[in-house]
Image: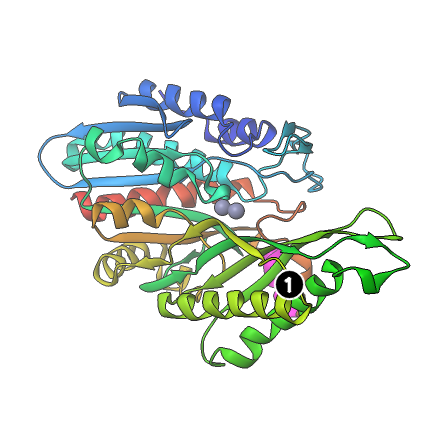
Amino acid sequence: MTIDLEALFIDLHRNPELSFQEVRTAGIAAAHLRGLGLEVAEGIGRTGVVGVLSNGEGPVVWMRADMDALPVVEQSGLDYASTAKGVDPEGHEVGVMHACGHDMHVTALIGAIEELVATKDQWSGTVVAIVQPAEEFGAGARAMLDDGMQERFPAPDVVLGQHVTPLPAGMIGVRPGPQMSASDGLHVVMRGRGGHGSRPHSTIDPVVMAAATVMRLQTIVSREVDPHDLAVVTVGALHAGTKNNIIPAEATLDLSLRYPDETLRESVLASVERVIRAEALASGAIEEPTIETLHTLPATINDESATERATAAFRAAFGEDAVVDPGLFTGSEDVSWFARDTGVPLVFWFWGGIDPARYAAAAANGTLHSEIATNHSPFFAVEIHPTIEVGVRALTVAAREFLD
Ligand SMILES: [Zn+2]
Ligand SMILES: [Zn+2]
């Protein structure tokens, strides 16, 4: 029996599902894992799937793929592009797209499990396949662990995960130590006093208060963080008011903060809070602003020695030139909760999904940033081949490194 991975990928791509709504995707993954002879549990952390492949004495390897899609209207122009719609947590109808490549992650995991099953006589130990929901909420890994993953399944010796990225297909990007940033999402409400637009003196204007806050927040990274350190402060949403002649009572700001270093996190968070409170005070606000944490993600830090082992295995499998250090990413991931909760090494790497010729042409023209769509773009498009094959092989090679 051979699984048609291309058909699986196209099917998942055409039928993306939003975070924590991955019922169809989970069902497909569970059916494949069951078909391969794994013991499968469903509904872990709402829609998560766990499959256990026991093959005698030896190490336990957790292999994780995330499966959720994004509220993005696909514009890739692919003939298998998604036209799916979904309903987001606020109740809005949105287009849905696998704009982060998680369809490829699920496909590669199923392919790797198939490979490990086929070569069972060459290794011993236990493989735990994890199909995780809601990575894009930064909530799915936490939900699965809080649902008793540690008690219900064999404890890992190592956690493996991979993410498809805008590198040329065939390339692997991996580095020991910090790989991705920690992240906090904040929701801020700044309160003024509403009134008539013609009588600003009788109000405390939250629009001006919020505007000043947005500008002042930009000085944290440029004036307070050491230029050698990496941090990002983004205000991704700013809402206030309904009409030109009404001064509203409040304004809301949604912030995304990134830092690979946990100490820096504390100082940036303190600065953000100081600026918000000080700008409210400067505006004469009577009520304190409120700052609510929407999510907190730890930094993705690769274990030094386990990552060196995996990297050597990748070099042997794909060749020296195919394995690069992709640098530190300002993006964030929730995969590391699996390793942090269980106290074991994490190895998380990237693999390329872009047509190498197209990538090389854009690099030669200096137009990589404008021409090669990144994850979360409506134009993000992964070459099916050899991305599937490389993803399957990378995951298999890394698993075998710890199982052999
Ligand atoms: Zn993403
Ligand atoms: Zn992703």
Q: Nearer the viewer, residue 166 or 236?
A: 236
The answer to whether residue 76 of the structure is visible from this angle is yes
Span shown in magenta:
357-365
- Total marks drawn? 1
For residue 46, which quarter of the picture?
A: top left
The answer to whether residue 329 of the structure is visible from this angle is no
Tell me what residue is drawn at x 58 percent, y 65 percent: 276
Q: Residue 103: give x, y in percent of width and height.
A: 50, 36
Q: Residue 48: give x, y in percent of width and height.
A: 39, 29
Tell me what residue is drawn at x 48 percent, y 62 percent: 258
Tell me what residue is drawn at x 51 percent, y 61 percent: 257
For residue 284, which quarter of the picture?
A: bottom right
In the visual, does 13 lie left or right of 196?
left
Q: Nearer the viewer, residue 320 or 311?
A: 311
Q: Nearer the viewer, residue 149 or 49?
A: 149
Disc 1 within 8 angstroms of ligand 1 (CB): no
Residue identifier under label 1: 369
- Prevailing SS of the magenta stretch: helix
- Badge 1 element: helix
